[in-house]
Image (cartoon, rainbow, N blue to C red):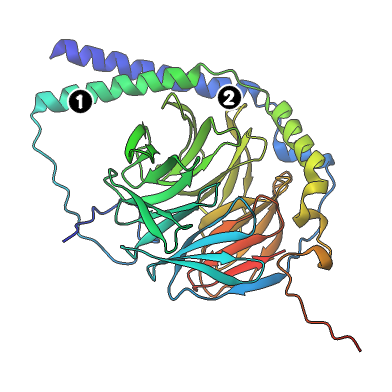
Amino acid sequence: MLIYTTPPKTNRIREARFECSCSKTAMSSKTQSSSSMAQARRTVQQLRIEASIERVKVSKASSDLMRYCGEHAKNDPLLMGIPASENPFKDKKPCTVL
Amino acid sequence: MAAEKAEMDKLKKECDALRTQIEAARKAVNDGSMSASAGGVAGLGRIQLKLRKNLKGHLAKIYAMHWSADSRQMVSASQDGKLLIWDTFTGNKLVAVPLKSAWVMSVAFAPSGNLVASGGLDNICTVYNIKAASPKTLRELDAHTGYLSCCRFLSDTEILTASGDTTCCLWDLETGKQKTVFTNHIGDCMSLALSPDMNTFISGACDSLAKLWDLREGACKQTFSGHTSDINAIAFFQNGHAIITGSDDCSCKMYDLRSDQEVITYQDPSLNAGVTSVALSNSGRLIFAGYDDFNCHIWDSLKGEKIGVLSGHDNRVSCTGVPNDGMGVCTGSWDSFLKLWN
């Protein structure tokens, strides 16, 4: 029988409730403190990486995004509209020749 | 013990200092908002798209869909236990893939069109060869300890998965083994998206954070905060410099990767429903966001204004996608239908 661990996320996606069957192994207080030490070291390491990046001014980033949208607008069918004859999703009605 | 406590205190102090440094660096480059910059850009007026196809076939809630790279085929996944591959030009169903586990949450089409992958509450990402005479299971990727929320192929030999176990993972499909495990989120990972240059990917999680990862290094490079609830959906802006997120806090946000911060929020006081899915039109100007209010709302990505709505579903819009040629938008819903609009 498959046992599903209950994700912390609230049940918008899941329809059935599953019993949580995760069991934590008992940790000695020494193990706990060394694992939270390791966690703290990892957090510092991660923050050092994130702090070190070069940042571009928001005004420049915004103008680059605006320029991209402007340059590609003519290639955006949802923006420009699609002529009926070129619309792949439009249902083709049968024509009768009178 | 005292030495340990001293070291913990030192580490905590360094964390706080680094966080302050990051916030200060972000503030230092925050010289103006996107919506202010976009003040001079011409407005789009109301965007009205028509319903072109209503795809019937699933018998239960649709949870995910993904376009093929050919912009014609599309795969959808439903908790009726099936994947359906559609020819969206004719509305015909081309292939039906029966699933071992009906609790599917994600589906993906390989760029080659040869493979599809799906997974969900079984914690497994199953890859199928759909070019065989009848769909054949190629691999069962079984190492996550939580549900599979999202999967995306890099190629026929590599796939990325996001899981409720808070990790993302890069798998080698030739061996069926994990190549890299991406660990840093502290909540269920709900969504991922590959950068256009395939060197990085972004993930959104229930810790309300979005993270940028280097695929080859396996490291988290940037973390984006601002949302106040689970991020359910995430997408790259086409130039690879910005990302769009959709959240249970009822808003979408754009974060610029080079400024390392949020540049615009898409929210409306009348919208009190969570965002389930996001997709961009080809120029990036339009954001299609699926909501729990049964609609897909259309946002002007530069001005932050709501400029249209795709209405017609009778239940939550669970997935949204724009094909590579940008010719339309597909919405999938818990009402069991997929709709094509343009």
Residue reaching furthest to the front: B133
Is residue B235 shown to the viewer in this render?
yes
Looking at the image, is B16 positioned above or below residue A1? above
Residue reaching furthest to the top: B3
- Foreground disc of the pair 1, 2: 1
| Amino acid type of the residue tagged 1 in the rendering | Ser
| Amino acid type of the residue tagged 2 in the rendering | Arg
Looking at the image, is B274 positioned above or below residue B39? below
Q: Nearer the viewer, residue B98 or B119?
A: B98
Q: Quadrant of residue B28?
A: top right
SS at mark 2 in the image: helix
Locate residue B72 relative to residue A1 in the image: left or right. Answer: right
Q: Position of residue B327 (x, y in %)?
A: 72, 57
Residue found 83% across the figure and 67% down from its top: A85
Locate residue B272 relative to residue A73 in the image: left or right. Answer: left
Pointer 2 residue: B26
Residue found 60% across the figure and 50% down from its top: B69
Q: Quadrant of residue B242?
A: top right
Pointer 1 residue: A35
What's the CA distance linking mark 1 and mark 2?
31 Å
Q: Nearer the viewer, residue B136 or B37?
A: B136
